[in-house]
Amino acid sequence: MSNITKEKIVESVPQNGFFGHPKGLFTLFFTEFWERFSYYGMRAILVFFMYYEVTKGGLGFPEELALAIMSIYGSLVYMSGIIGGWLADRIFGTSKAVFYGGVLIMLGHIVLAIPGNATLFFVSMILIVLGTGLLKPNVSSMVGDIYSEQDNRRDSGFSIFYMGINLGGFLSPLVVGTVGMNNFHLGFSLAAIGMFIGLVVYVITRNKNLGLAGTVVVNPLSKEEKKKVFTIIGAGIVVIGILVAISIPLGILTFDTFIKLVGVLGILIPTLYFVVMYRSPKTTAVERSRIIAYIPLFIASIMFWAIQEQGSTILANYADKRTQLDFAGLHISPAWFQSLNPLFIITLAPLFAWMWVKLGNRQPSIPQKFSLGLLFAGLSFLIILLPAYFGGADSLVNPLWLVLSYFVVVIGELCLSPVGLSATTKLAPAAFSAQTMSLWFLSNAAAQAINAQIVKFYTPETEMMYFGVIGGAALVLSLLLFILSPKIQGYMKGVK
């Protein structure tokens, strides 16, 4: 453990200069803004790039495969955060992790911008998955480093930081989506330029604005451990390389088997996390009770994200194929719908923050808020099956139906996502506090791993049943969670 204390880190950061916040917040805000701009801009056109015909500049993948790959990609991005967090904690610190991550993301987008084949596409995906895993968890961690624990600006600073995330997520589908739907590779070039700008801002301002923040390796490997770990990693890469080289020509490793493998890992990894934490001698009896309370919340979170994350897969496909894109004298790009989620979050988040404070002790409990999140997620899918019910599966749908569906699921997100982050910090065993936050993000990885298995059931013929079954399942789980809320609350042992 380094002998540089938290107090020394905070003292090294200029404490005023960005709307009354530490100057470092400027650096982290704009780094994350441009990273999200590049990521969400790329994501807004990626599924279309995969299934559009080669003559339209796409890769010509079957739609079902493109939707599954999109889900697997999202799942791997969240799984890679565990690796990124470990590397920062044990080897090179969060500051270097953010820089290396940004470089890998930029390279991934540059590879996507090169007209090529499926091989180049998968190389870019690997680079972006690894890069996002390095950058995303660690840039958030650095925001916490620039404030002392007692600083009452801390929550406000995180709110400003998350505004950067959502501003980047809102603007990029409009900019990259507009250009990219006409020329995919030009769109990916804009995403690469966005990440480049973020890196330039970070490199130029980090020494002056961030001081020692992110430079301390909190739990460094000893020389002996380093040798052992690097040997294991090297051997692991060689073994995986050999297995891949053998299994692909033999037809053992196919898209289908890889999708199933990630699906298994999506469930297996969080299950192992729960078992290890529960059985650890470092976990107290009270903490074990809280872990039991956390399990139904985690399951509810998987169900919620399974619906919410289909905004970039099934609903993106719906926007492209089923929606009337010439509307009110305007031609709408199907990529623009990806801006709705961050737009509604920016608009509604202050209202929800005010509402919870106003309700005070009368506000719903944590499990009840989760059940509300599931309720709205389920309703968002039931809303989108109504056009087919009223007009049939062949007619083009008014885009306002899609807007309403995105709006309703965001209401659910604001009931569940910020509450889940807060509940995770409260319910986490002391010995596993950082790892429990990784576990929370694994609920999204698990959801998208499951989505990769179920998107194949979506066709124009099964549209109503698809939305109805998933939406109905969310409503049933919501009701069950609401009924069990007092019991779950009891297991929380004083956490409210």
Image (spheres, grey):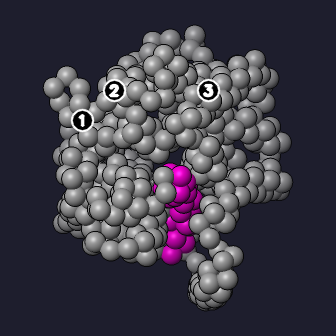
The residue shown at (28%, 72%) is: 115
Check contact, mark 2 vs mark 1: CB within 8 A: yes
The first of marks 1 and 3 along the sequence is 1
**Spot occupied by residue 171 in the image (x, y as percentages of width and height):** 24, 42
The answer to whether residue 278 is seen in the rendering is yes
The first of marks 2 and 1 along the sequence is 1
**Spot occupied by residue 343 in the image (x, y as percentages of width and height):** 31, 32
Amino acid beneath label 1: Ile
The residue shown at (56%, 35%) is: 461
The mark found on residue 468 in the picture is 3
Q: Which residues are magenta?
A: 64-91
Quarter of the view holding residue 312:
top left
Which quarter of the image is occupied by the C terminus? top right
Tell whether position 78 is magenta: yes
The residue shown at (37%, 28%) is: 396
The residue tagged 1 is 332
The mark found on residue 366 in the picture is none
* Most foreground residue, 478 or 489: 478
The answer to whether residue 198 is seen in the rendering is no
* Most foreground residue, 467 or 188: 467
The residue tagged 2 is 399
Instruction: Determine whether the residue tagged by mark 1 lies in a helix, strand or loop.
Output: loop
**Spot occupied by residue 332 in the image (x, y as percentages of width and height):** 24, 35
The first of marks 3 and 2 along the sequence is 2
